[in-house]
Amino acid sequence: MSKEDYRPQRLTFPEEKATEWLPMLLDSYYIADKAIFEAVTKRERRGERLACAKGCSSCCHTHITIPIYPLELVGIYWFVIEKMGGAVRDEVKRQLKEFRKGKGCPFLVDGACAIHPMRPLACRHFNVFNRPCAPGEDPYYSRRRDVLDPDEKAKNKALAAMLPFHGIRERAERKRAIRTGALNSFVKNLHEIDWPALAMRMDGRSPRGPLL
Ligand code: SF4
Ligand code: SF4
């Protein structure tokens, strides 16, 4: 497989045409994924090797501070309720019901991210080189040089793509919102979210939640 085969594609779903929010989220993720791909490629050309790969997942147990923006939470709700099926759905539902803060991410199933297309920017941006994280290791502190520094401009561009969800549409307004960090006041930590409520939505038993 050539390097080009790994080049990120913008995800598409048929539901995009009927929603305003989904294209915004997919645009945001595409902006982020492209920039990450380029940053990773640059380091690989210098001889480093990306350690992150499917099945490598100790980060999903170790990290308990994972910011999630409101539009991302809507995307996760939608994906879990509408798109997830089969045994993975059953397992995610069980894990959401039993979720306890600090016990690992409820979307990790058999070492893989069950919401991979909708995983938040924070997970997309965290990439580690040279060797996989040891259990319990946060390389941000143990070997900072091995952690990818995502391009700040691209990070802001990805965030700016989410701003129309909050009614911030004009270019100047968006720039101001990014500069002042306006979105930060809406961020939730993955480990602080009421995930059992999402499990209830999967059962059709609760009208609450961020789904539009
Ligand atoms: S961040 Fe660490 S544990 Fe997570 S996928 Fe990358 S190397 Fe593996
Ligand atoms: S959302 Fe996915 S990638 Fe992020 S911590 Fe959870 S399982 Fe890991």
Image: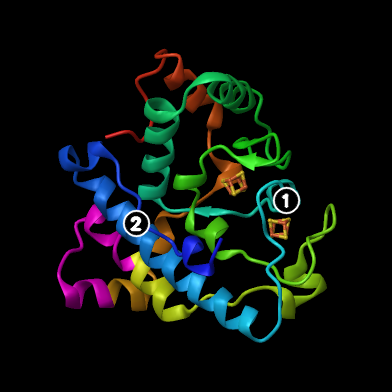
The span from disc 1 to disc 2 (Cα, nearest Å) is 24 Å
| Span highlighted in magenta in the image | 160-175
Specify the quadrant that holds the N terminus: bottom right
Q: Residue at x 24, y 71 (%)?
A: 174
Disc 2 residue lies near ligand 2 with CB under 8 A = no
For disc 2, the marked residue is: 10
Most foreground residue, 110 or 165: 110
Specify the quadrant that holds the C terminus: top left
Q: Residue at x 39, y 14 (%)?
A: 204
Disc 1 residue lies near ligand 1 with CB under 8 A = yes
Q: Residue at x 65, y 49 (%)?
A: 54
Q: Position of residue 155 (x, y in %)?
A: 43, 72
For disc 1, the marked residue is: 56
Q: Residue furthest bottom?
A: 46
- Determine whether, in the image, residue 54 is placed left or right of residue 22: right
Task: Determine crowd level at label 1: few under 14, some 14-19, many 20+ residues with C-alpha closer than 10 A.
Answer: few
Q: Residue furthest front?
A: 1
Relative vertical location of residue 60 with respect to residue 183 in this rendering, above or below: above
Q: For numbered disc 1, what is the local secondary structure?
A: loop
Q: Residue at x 34, y 73 (%)?
A: 178
| Ligand 1 lies in quarter | bottom right
Answer with mark 1 or mark 2, whichever residue precedes in sequence: 2
Q: Amino acid at mark 2?
A: Arg
Most foreground residue, 9 or 58: 9
Q: Position of residue 164 (x, y in %)?
A: 22, 58
Q: For numbered disc 2, what is the local secondary structure?
A: loop
Q: How many marks?
A: 2
Relative vertical location of residue 149 with respect to residue 128 in this rendering, above or below: below
Task: Determine crowd level at label 2: few under 14, some 14-19, many 20+ residues with C-alpha closer than 10 A.
Answer: some
Q: Amino acid at mark 1?
A: Cys
Image quadrant of residue 169? bottom left
